[in-house]
Amino acid sequence: MKVFLSADIEGTAGIVHWDEVERSHADFEEFRRLMTGEVLAACEGARATGASEVVIRDAHDSGRNLILDMLPDYAKIVRAWSGHPDGMMFGLNAEFTAAIYTGYHAKAGSEANPLAHTTNLRISRLILNGEVVSEFTMNALCATRYGVPSVFLSGDAEICADARALVPELRTVATLEGFGRASLSISPARARAAIREGVEDALSRVSSTQIPKLQGPFEIALEFVTPGDAWRASWYPGAYLNGRRTVGFKAADIFDIQRALRFLTA
Ligand SMILES: [Zn+2]
């Protein structure tokens, strides 16, 4: 059994400030270690159910966050950005039994995590077929393209609830809750134990009902903080301005939406 793990950092237990996720900041060392600890716990949970390989997508910012020497010998790591529209899911294919997610965070526009965002801080909301969506939604739909179920997610409480709304049988571990610029978090040790146990539980009952349906046609509205960014993105083929801060795009196929987002958000 091969398991795909997409790892972000803004939903790691304990995290609260942008300095902690920024490679060039002194705070980063501590939080990359905590992120890697959660990834390692997920790997151990997968191994306990007989996974032969865990492919880890280091999916935050530079794609160079995980402390590689902490990872087990049955792991492979996808680092940095290829430019492929699968982005945070790059490396996934139909050979995987399941996709799992750690360190995930609430979507842009939410107050449930001080570090809530979608893709980058220039985007104020991403709307798919009329609903404000998260990075998880787009990534789970990417997994659907390969017929791979999404079975486990750890991150802040709101992304856990959002993710279960999309995939009701998803196993989740809530690491923290946001209050303004503060957070209330479980301890890293407790998060790691819950993630290990949760991944083991999730992978022991994988089901095709954990593959969210892809119902095209698709229409996105990408809202930017700044009108100039929307104007700039509107030059992508097929994209159109919708008001001053929003770019729209329509497609029958989710991959065309992924490809558009790859360029519209760049
Ligand atoms: Zn991130």
Image (tube, rainbow, N blue to C red):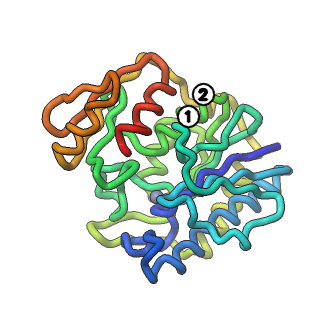
Asked whether the residues under the numbered discs 2 and 1 touch, taking CB atoms below 8 Å apart as contact, a structural biologist would say yes
Residue at left offset 52%, top offset 37%: 85
Query: In the picture shown, does residue 10 fall above or below 96?
Result: below
Q: Position of residue 72 (x, y in %)?
A: 79, 65
Can the viewer see residue 20 in this picture? yes
Pointer 2 local density, CA inside 10 Å: few below 14, some 14–19, many at least 20: some
Instruction: Please tell me whether mark 2 sits on a helix, a strand or a loop.
Output: helix
Instruction: Determine the CA span between mark 2 and mark 1.
Output: 5 Å
Residue that numbered label 1 is attached to: 142
Q: Residue at x 40, y 38 (%)?
A: 263
Q: Quadrant of residue 26?
A: bottom left
Name the residue tied to disc 2: 145
Q: Is mark 1 within 8 Å of ligand 1?
A: no
The kind of secondary structure element at disc 1 is helix
Residue nearer the viewer, 142 or 192? 142
For residue 39, side relative to residue 51 (left or right): left
Relative depth, front residue between 218 and 183? 218
Farthest residue to the bottom: give it: 26
239 relative to 187 in the view: left or right: left
**The N terminus is located in which quarter?**
top right
Can the viewer see residue 172?
Answer: no
Under 8 Å from ligand 1: the CB of mark 2? no
Q: Label 2 is placed on what type of residue? A: Arg
- Taking 38 as reference, is 220 above or below it? above
Q: Is residue 110 above or below residue 222?
A: below
Labels in figure, total: 2
